[in-house]
Amino acid sequence: MKIEAWLFIALAPFFALVATVYGFMGDWHEPVGYLALYLTAGLSIMIGGYLWFTARRVGPRPEDRVDAEIHEGAGEQGMFSPWSWWPLVLGLGAASGFMGLAVGWWIVYISIGLTTVAIIGWVYEYSRGDHAH
């Protein structure tokens, strides 16, 4: 994961430089462009930092080693629930929230409730019903 971490961390100064040049070329009158680029630089640092700390905690993966064999990456990669409907409900809540920003604020309040229910349902999916642990 160190390669991915360095990739994201190295992109942050590039985005900051591009944002500064964009701001100077536009005389700092158009705030959306340079602000979005500065936020992209910050997000790149956040992702790179997360990957860096995860790489230190987990250690080298088979993908990080030159002498690794294909079979070393086999096995269980995580726990995923293919029958879950909660991601769809969460996506509808997020989409209606963004639609509410464009159409009307009252839709945002409904989507906040829908998104909250979807997150709670997804988190507690394995705590109730047939699949309770």
Image (cartoon, helix red, strand yellow):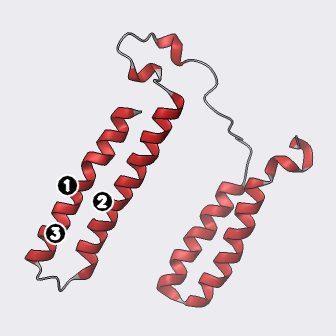
Looking at the picture, which amino acid does disc 3 mark? Thr
Q: Which residue is mark 2?
A: 41
The Cα–Cα distance between marks 1 and 2, rounded to whole angstroms, is 8 Å
Which quarter of the figure has residue 77? top right
x then y, percent, for residue 38: 28, 67
Callout 3: SS: helix
Q: Secondary structure at mark 1?
A: helix
The three-letter amino acid code for the residue at tag 1 is Phe
Which one is earlier in the sequence, the residue at label 2 or at label 3? 3
Q: What's under tag 2, amino acid-wise?
A: Ala
- Which numbered dot is residue 20? 3
- What element does badge 2 sit on? helix
- Tell whether label 2 touches label 1 (CB within 8 Å): yes
Q: Is residue 103 left or right of residue 92?
A: left
Going 47% across and 12% down the picture, which residue do you hit? 70
- For residue 14, the mark is 1
Would residue 73 appear left or right of 26 to someone viewing this image? right
Q: Position of residue 23 (x, y in %)?
A: 15, 75
**Labels 3 & 1 near each other (Cβ < 8 A):** no
Farthest residue, direction right: 129
